[in-house]
Image (cartoon, rainbow, N blue to C red):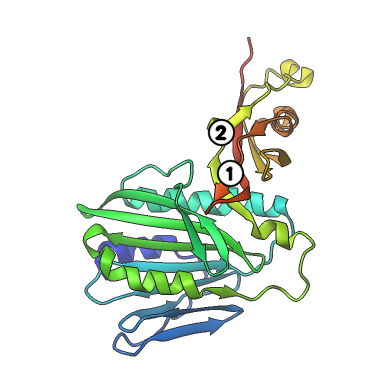
């Protein structure tokens, strides 16, 4: 593995929770991982490093003399509802994207790539980031998804010249990945499993009513941007809205406006899906 991608791995590791790694010998045959309710297979010639901690399972696959790096990052705590999933997407996925994009000298994409990925029996919309690492043209793919009520991120980073060499391992992980559901499944588990991450959704709004400026905010001379995390159903209707940033006196108005917004329906692999993302409102005092 090239030094530059090793640095990327270190920067993305869950801070403060990195025990001594358990590594599979690179010369061993085809391998499989099964621990903590998470399992997948990978081809011969790849090394598996386990940097899991109390909160996160963090598995890294690498291959000698190749820059290709595959990570499976699975948060252990099961999510119970769509609101938690939307909040986790904002708090966890976006920092991952920004960190990886920064290493490639690129800007984190606001919306996922239109191509879908079938991960076992689940569908995922991912983000493709092109840039350079140590001067080499490089690409990263990041797929956030929910399996077994757990938030996962599948990451595939490589110099472009090594893409073919990493493709077999990536395909094996994607096709065989399984996550055991928690003992007590949430009533919203089925709904959450069909939600994909959509990034910034402003540009996909068919209707975006302007928010009312609260009198309390006027009195406090409050202004600025309010970001609202939303869940949009298969028909394009907003079914959940929660402000995640902005002045406290403006957040409620942003949430109320977001609930009245309407979006174009989203399909993934030809199937209608729910989408979680953010919508922003700019409040300016006149």
Q: Position of residue 81 (x, y in %)?
A: 74, 56
Residue 231 in which image quadrant: top right
Q: Are marks 2 and 1 in contact (CB under 8 Å)?
A: yes
Picture residue at 71% right of the left edge, 73% below the top:
182
Q: Nearer the viewer, mark 2 or mark 1?
A: 1
In the rendering, at what x and y percent does residue 256 appear?
A: 75, 30
Residue 240 % position (x, y): 73, 43
Question: Residue furthest toward the top?
Answer: 286
On screen, residue 23 above or below 271:
below
Residue lying furthest front: 270
In terms of secondary structure, where does tag 1 sit? strand
Dot 2 falls on a residue whose secondary structure is helix
Instruction: Locate residue 191 relative to residue 64 in the image: left or right.
Output: right
Q: Which residue is mark 1?
A: 266
* Mark seen at residue 240: none
Q: From this viewpoint, is residue 53 visible?
A: no
- Locate residue 127 relative to residue 86 in the image: left or right: left
Question: What distance separates the C-alpha of mark 2 from that of mark 1?
Answer: 10 Å
Q: Residue at x 71, y 56 (%)?
A: 191
N-term mark: 2 or 1 = 2
Q: How many marks?
A: 2
């Amino acid at each position: 593995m090239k030094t530059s991608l090793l640095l990327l791995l270190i920067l993305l590791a869950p801070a403060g929770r990195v025990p001594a790694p358990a590594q599979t010998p690179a010369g061993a045959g085809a391998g499989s991982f099964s621990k903590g309710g998470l399992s997948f297979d990978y081809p011969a010639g790849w090394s598996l490093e386990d940097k899991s901690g109390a909160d996160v399972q963090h598995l890294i696959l690498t291959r000698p003399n190749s820059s290709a790096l595959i990570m499976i990052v699975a948060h252990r705590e099961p999510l119970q509802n769509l609101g938690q999933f939307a909040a986790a997407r904002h708090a966890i996925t976006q920092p991952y994207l920004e960190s990886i994009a920064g290493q490639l000298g690129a800007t984190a994409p606001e919306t996922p790539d239109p191509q879908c990925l079938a991960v076992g029996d689940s569908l995922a919309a991912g983000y493709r980031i092109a840039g350079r690492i140590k001067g080499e043209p490089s690409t990263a793919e990041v797929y956030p998804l929910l399996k077994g009520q757990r938030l996962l991120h599948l990451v595939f980073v490589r110099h472009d010249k090594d893409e073919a060499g990493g493709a077999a391992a990536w395909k094996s992980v994607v096709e065989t990945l399984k996550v055991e559901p928690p003992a007590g499944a949430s009533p919203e588990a089925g709904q959450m499993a069909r939600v994909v991450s959509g990034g910034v959704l402003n540009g996909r709004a068919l209707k975006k009513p302007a928010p009312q400026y609260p009198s309390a905010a006027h009195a406090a001379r409050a202004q600025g941007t309010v970001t609202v995390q939303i869940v949009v159903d298969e028909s394009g209707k907003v079914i959940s809205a929660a402000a995640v940033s902005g002045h406290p006196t403006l957040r409620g108005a942003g949430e109320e406006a977001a609930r009245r917004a309407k979006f174009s329906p989203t399909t993934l692999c030809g199937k209608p899906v729910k989408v979680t993302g953010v919508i922003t409102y700019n409040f300016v005092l006149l």
